[in-house]
Amino acid sequence: MLLEIKNLTASVEGKPILKGVDFSLDAGQTHAIMGPNGSGKSTLANILMGNPEYEVTGGSLLWNGTDLLGLEPHERALAGLFLSYQYPVEIPGLTVGKFLKRAAETRLEGEENLNVGSYLKEIRENMEFLEMDRNFINRYLNTGFSGGEKKRMEILQMLMFKPRLAILDETDSGLDIDALRVVSRGVNRLKGPGFSSIIITHYQRILDYVKPDRVHVLYDGRIVESGGPELVNELEKKGYEWIKKQVRGEVSHEQSVHSA
Amino acid sequence: MSSPSTVLNKEEYQHGYHFPDQSIFKTRRGLDEEIIRAISGQKKEPEWMLDFRLKAYEAFRQKSMPNWGADLSRIDFDNIYYYAKPTEEQKRTWEDVPEDIKETFDRIGIPEAEKKFLAGVGAQYDSEVVYHNLKEELEKQGVVFCSPEEAVQNHPDLVRKYFGTVIPYRDNKFAALNSAVWSGGSFVYVPPGIRVDIPLQAYFRINSENFGQFERTLIIADEGSFVHYVEGCTAPVYTTDSLHSAVVEIIALEGARVRYSTIQNWSGDVYNLVTKRAFAYKNATVEWVDGNLGSKRTMKYPSVFLKEEGAHGEILSIAFAGQGQEQDTGGKVFHLADNTSSVITSKSISKDGGVSSYRGMIKVHPGRKNIRSRVVCDALLLDEKSVSNTYPYMEIASEDVTMEHEASVSKISDDQLFYLQSRGFTEEEAAAMIVNGFLDPLVKELPMEYAVELNRLIELQMEGSVG
Ligand SMILES: Nc1ncnc2c1ncn2[C@@H]1O[C@H](COP(=O)(O)OP(=O)(O)OP(=O)(O)O)[C@@H](O)[C@H]1O
Ligand SMILES: [Mg+2]
């Protein structure tokens, strides 16, 4: 098992958000996580990446059998985790080119030196693949990028870093049809036994391009439903009301949740 | 008057530093007329320069310490060496530079490319220029680039005409001190219409404990000429206080453009009190790029006097205040003529309780027309205990003025830190990248080697700082 999450509970500023998440994923698999706004999807993604704003209050996170909670965020990145953010952060003054070069250097082993020429070539090639303008390499990271451009920049990073697990947090949101196709192509390009992904989304569209092996519904801090790709259609048809009703039948909970 | 030999003594001593001090002559601690005569005598100066020094010394004694800005109360003028001469004579080639000085350059981390570049520069070691080699093409162009001592000997007319005219010796206590005991620095004269394509660079450093460094730079850009002068500084770490008090004067005649860039990285015990001022005549442009890292206290406000129509002044100031440090920096522009414009951009970073203060002055003389000025101050705080101050003084005695002032203080954001950490960077690396990014728009104004050096220095400053 590449990733194994057991009974994970977490809170933000003292407020419980995740209330017992169980989830596991094998190497090479693609899983989708859906669920209404505020259900905790981004929280889960941030916790996997080690964001200190989120406090893990219980449960376990295993990465290849080792405890992920003992690793710093950068160690997780170097161990092969990658998060494509729902809202990528702007870093004024740091050019994309410099950022990618430094990121590649941190991934070198021992005495190895970065071959800048071939790395630059790889960046260019990937940018072409993602239909990005070459000039982005000289721009400040995410600074003043449009929503769609930021998402492409996340996917460019993913292609460059070649993670073992990529978590795509609503990378498809706010993308036009062409951009969606391009982004999906990026994910599919890495697909293989050494690459897994978790696709967090509200829409069926991206899952038509990137076929998930499993689909999960996160609702009020728990995974309440898991199934094959057919679950996406069911959600699309019935909406989250269906899930809510189901959950209400089993568990009672105090607060109301806004549905998507 | 006693002979210089009673004042100058040959000293050999061991400090915590790795290399022996090879100074041949060194005045005793403290300052009096005798020492000034000894310095002047050592340099075989003409009478007029000795007179200048003595008058300046008198002004120094009369002037009081500044009662504003950084705390200077711990400076002990009696405990400072005011002059040391490092090696017998100036060296002509890099090969001739003594091995331990080369090693020192290596320790400072001057890139190889820059060492080669030194073929065209004067580099200062202790208070004397030990290495000076004027590039042939500069000579062909008639450009003078030498130590001020050489200029006094070889270009007395230029020196007498301009020396101390931009910054009179009685300007302030530290300018007076420098005028009395100055040693080393650079003298640049660019003839009319000549563009100097490569930046002229001087690298200098303090290498003696308690040894004040009082270099003196005078740049004269004749009509329609252009020159970029670059100065960098690094000093080793000592436990006691030392004083650096330089004077830089620039004269940009009609249509000339002068750019002066400095990156200074003093060790944490240095008082860095520098007076920098430029006169810009008709349609001339003067640009100061001034980066201040390290030191215990820095007080430095490069100024431009826009003396004639169409003159333009630009000041870019970068300050980094770490633990126990106070960077009191900024810029001043005096609009003395119609149709003059200025821009001051200040970027400061404070961490570990460091204090960065922007202190600026824009002055428009009565009735001057069509004046434009823009001041932008951005401060970045790396933690809660660090401080940023802004003192933007303005004296505007004219209606016909377009004045813009923007100031911002930001804290390094957790979101930015985490974003970069999640891409594989340690917290320190992430913070250094954000700080370098904050400075990037200014760093781009520097020549490549210095931009790289500044980035590296920022990374050093950031080591062990976050957590
Ligand atoms: N930094 C934070 N401070 C305070 N509350 C937070 C923070 N981050 C998340 N929350 C809260 O935690 C809950 C879950 O948020 P989360 O972003 O994980 O939801 P989501 O499932 O990703 O929703 P969406 O579909 O809208 O992206 C929300 O109620 C949100 O307001
Ligand atoms: Mg979300």
Image (spheres, coloured by chain):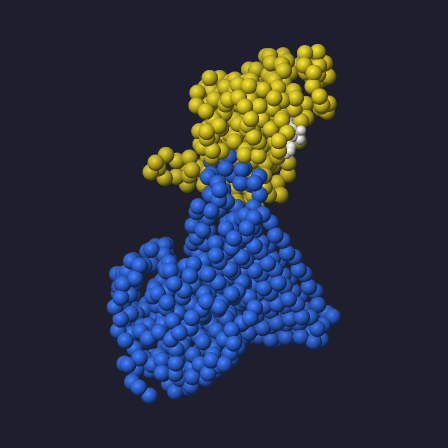
Chain colours: A yellow, B blue
Residue A178: name its quadrant: top right
Is B256 left or right of B126, judged from the image as shown?
right
- Any part of residue B216 in sight: yes
Residue B223 seen in render: no
Residue B324 image offset from top left, x and y in percent: 48, 57
- Quadrant where the N terminus of chain B sits is bottom left
Where B165 falls versus B379 (above or below)? below
- Above or below residue B189? Residue B325 is above
Determine the image quadrant of residue A237: top right
The residue closer to the viewer here, B346 or B384, is B384
Where B395 sits versus B454, above or below? below
Image point 49% across, 21% down: which residue? A3
Q: Where residue B454 appears, x then y in whole percent?
A: 45, 54
Q: Count the labels in the image.
A: 0
Foreground residue among B379 and B158 = B379
Report the side of B3 relative to B279 (left or right). Answer: left
Residue at 56% x, 54% y is B387
Is B283 in front, or is A67?
A67
Q: Is residue A250 left or right of residue B154?
A: right
Give the residue displayed 56% in from the left and 68% down from the top.
B68
Spot occupied by residue B312 in the image (x, y as percentages of width and height): 60, 68
- Looking at the image, which residue is at 51% across and 39% down? B420
- B122 left or right of B24 in image: right
Q: Is residue A44 above or below residue B11?
A: above
Q: Position of residue A21 (x, y in %)?
A: 57, 20
